[in-house]
Amino acid sequence: MRRSAIAATLAVAAGLVVANTLGVAAAEAPTTPTPVRSVSVEGVATVPIAQNANLAAATAVYRQAMANAMADGQSKAEFLAGKATVTLGSVQSIVEGGGSIDCTSDEESSYVEYEGERPDFGSPTTTISPLHAAAAPATPSVRKPKLKHPKKHPAAKKASAATCTLSTAVALSYAID
């Protein structure tokens, strides 16, 4: 009986050592952080820009458009949080979405090329609207010199003014409680 008592004591001691080791290993194991609950939105904005804006003016318009897009995104996030009956927290991420400039003439709303300088949209692939990629060359156009005595055509119409708009998007992610 003495042998079985010793064997039982050793078995219990070995079990406690194993359990203690596992307990320490579990305490040292990395814990998975609780994921932050969030809402992600895309704010968009379109603002007018002069057809022949210089770089400083184009950059100012682009920054105004980004500010408007952020306000639009915040408004959307607040709406969604309200519908989900949660509280909107702080901004977790902001991603610039690039932009494009489109111009149309007053006459028949046809596409007109933007002649000004382009702001840094963050990506060269987003500076031309996909709808008008074939009509708008990636490099500035070279103007032909004026003729000294241009021929007048009685059917020619006076060029109409162009209306240009700069569009941009900003992706936002907010924490929610």
Image (cartoon, rainbow, N blue to C red):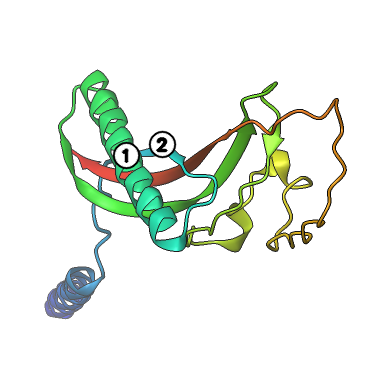
Total count of labels: 2
Q: Quadrant of the C terminus?
A: top left
Depth order, front residue of 37/19: 37
Outermost residue, front side: 149
Rendered location of residue 91, percent (x, y)? 23, 48
Depth order, front residue of 101/95: 101
Rendered location of residue 59, percent (x, y)? 40, 57
Depth order, front residue of 112/26: 112
Q: Residue at x 24, y 63 (%)?
A: 31
In the image, which disc is placed on residue 68? 1
Quadrant housing residue 16: bottom left
Vertical position of residue 43 compared to residue 126: above or below: above
106 with respect to 62 (left or right) = right
Rendered location of residue 28, percent (x, y)? 20, 74
Depth order, front residue of 107/114: 107
Rendered location of residue 158, percent (x, y)? 70, 31
Quadrant housing residue 144: bottom right
Hey, what amino acid is under mark 2?
A: Ala
Hey, what amino acid is under mark 1?
A: Asn
**Mark 2 nearby-residue class (10 Å; few <14, some 14–19, many ≥20):** many
13 with respect to 127 (left or right) = left
Q: Residue at x 72, y 59 (%)?
A: 141
Marks 2 and 1: CB-CB under 8 Å? yes
Gap between marks 2 and 1, in whole Å? Answer: 6 Å
Q: For mark 2, what is the residue?
A: 45
Vertical position of residue 112 compared to residue 140: above or below: above
Q: Residue at x 70, y 21 (%)?
A: 108
